[in-house]
Amino acid sequence: MGNGDFCFTADCTGLQTFADWHTRASARRDGRSATPLGTQSSWAFHWAPNPDGVTLADTERPYAAPGGRELRFPVAYEWRLSDEEARRVQPAGYYFWTNPQRLHLGRVAYVLRSPHTREPLLTPEPIDAVDQTLDLWSGALNSAFSLEGRRTTTRTAVHPHRDVLAVHAASELFAAGDARLRISFGAVDDTFEAEERRDDPGAHDSFVEISDDGRAVVVRRAVDDARYAVRAHVAGARFEHTSRHAIDIVPAAGDVHLVVEFAPEPSYKPLPSAAAVFAASTQQWERFWTSGAVVDFSGSSDPRAAELERRVVLSQYLTAIQCAGALPPQESGLVCNSWAGKFHLEMHWWHAAHFPMWGRPELLERSLEWYRAILPAARRNAERNGYRGARWPKHVGPEGVESPNDIGPLLVWQQPHPVYFAELVYRARRDDPAVLDTYADLVDETAHFLSSLLWWSDGEAHLAPPVMPAQERYDAATTWDPTFELAYVAWALRVACEWRRRRGQEVPDAWVRATEGMTSLPVTADGRYEAVRGQSAVIDHPSLLGALGFVPASPLVDRDTMSATLDWVLEAWDWQTTWGWDFPLIAMCARELGRLDLAFDMLLSPRPRNRYLANGHNFQVPNRLPLYLPGNGGLLAAIAMLVTDKTGAVASDLPEGWAIRAEGFPPRP
């Protein structure tokens, strides 16, 4: 449950009763899945202590570039090292790789014990008769379970505009004292996954104040340099401060109505009642589902149609609660931490570009203001190596500080994203001129950098070393002209030129020269595109296919050559190394080539990384990525492209077996 900036993940009890069990289960590497239980918010980050005073400059290393230039990038961190090795041999790199970290704000759980043995329940095995439904129309989770014949029911929801959780709990276990609720807190583990740590109570502080009547509590939290506050109010129970980092909610005779708020600082704003939160959640989700675009697959005879519709509906919900906040989301959203809890800007397109494609541009626009906030940092990132404009970082926290490693700072394909985002919003708002003024600075700064990034040789513009393609399997120091990036940069510069013309402004000569002088995409002797000039690995992302489909139709791309490239990828690729967004990427390319049967086949491919769990999450690997929201967002973007034409009308060329109704889709680039 969530609102875009705040999420609460529950287990079969409707709360986070078996969070430790879920953490252990998600760490298994036997192919099974368990979703970690988190409570996270966009504002909740912290920096660990820096006793050695290391700086990001300590991680910079030189790279040779054409023309005798020397460029410097913060690359001195090998993320494949163990945490212990990295701390020892690359202290600066490790520190800025793992900081800042997203905080786990707290757990809200049942404390259960057996009515017969009085032993505490630590795993869900004794629980039976579970009946749990997420009501997508109200945003509420309705849960029921039995323990030794005694029934418990729970209703849980999140406020649409505040970091507030509401709980309504009723249990036959309350009367005998065999169930109560608990709010508890942990520290953050300074490791790759930045997991919650509960075995070190001295690593954090909880200052608890309970009201005289026992119905209200304020907790002031301190985790390293971070401070935040938790407020709660309860009816039908009282609060008890039972341990250093835990407050129990002890029921009276009837139902328990609990409201918990997490905030960056204490607030005196009254807490809403649980009933008010449930009502606000219902109103918000009714508005969501009755706005934007919709697709109906029910008329299809293809036996996979119901599964595709399930994925589409749940992906809309999951991305709305986790990818529509004030910051770009991390790949595991607001559930658990991946890559130290930071977000990856190259993945922002996959998380959120679908929002304007589905007629909900405001859900993307919430995070576009963050790009403007880090413009000074992005300009410095470009200036360090003599470039103009803004070079957007790759792997960051709220401040926009680049994380050092041998891939991220050299990556290019996140650079054109702000132009794509702005153009999608412009189309979704039906060519609203106000959009041009709102995002002109982001488009201009991006285009200034892209045009200055190019290396000119014999009258042609190249992407020259050091450059890391989206298919992160090449030596950045020797890589030239990645196919996808060439097409994407050329397209973004053409759009930036058009934005200047729409606003009645002069187009910089450097932009025009770049759009006219881009080198041709690299082609093999047998007539297919190479991933980068002179090389084509067959593992990881088949990103070269993104040059057509993901990138709107480009004069750089020959359709017959791309069709041959698609056939080669389908035959030669190592599919065990692909990721969740690769399948929508291939579907987009196939759709642009008119191969709609293949496009639908790719969205429904049975390959492991294209697996969607019962809760809708695109499962990738245990432990690190038990959910992968770029897959969900990519699916929605691909559906928008597959079922409509570029005017937003229902496509007339759908393959046999697919009868689709759709409405609300705006025009696309």
Image (tube, rainbow, N blue to C red):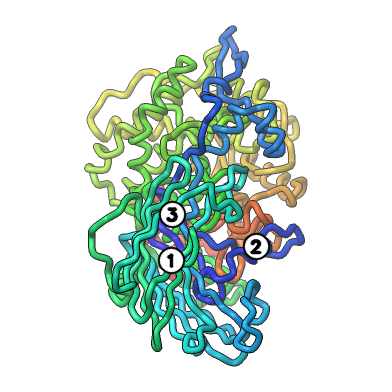
State left or right for residue 401 relative to residue 624: left
The residue at the point 67 percent across, 33 percent down is: 86
Residue 346: where, in percent of width, then height? 52, 40
Q: Nearer the viewer, residue 38 or 52?
A: 52
Q: Nearer the viewer, mark 3 or mark 2?
A: 3
Q: Residue at x 77, y 46 (%)?
A: 572
Rendered-image quadrant of the C terminus: top left
Q: Which residue is mark 2?
A: 611
Above-or-below relation of 176 to 664? below
- According to the picture, the residue beneath numbered tag 3 turns out to be 206
Distance from disc 1 to disc 3, alpha carbons, whole Å, reads 11 Å
Q: Is residue 238 left or right of residue 81?
A: left
Of residues 544 and 321, the one nearer the viewer is 321
- Measured as percent of width and height from the top left, residue 372 is found at 33, 35
Disc 3 residue type (three-letter): Ser
**Quadrant location of the N terminus?**
bottom left
Q: Position of residue 117 (x, y in %)?
A: 66, 85
The answer to which quarter of the image holds residue 416 is top left
Dot 2 or dot 1: first in sequence order is 1
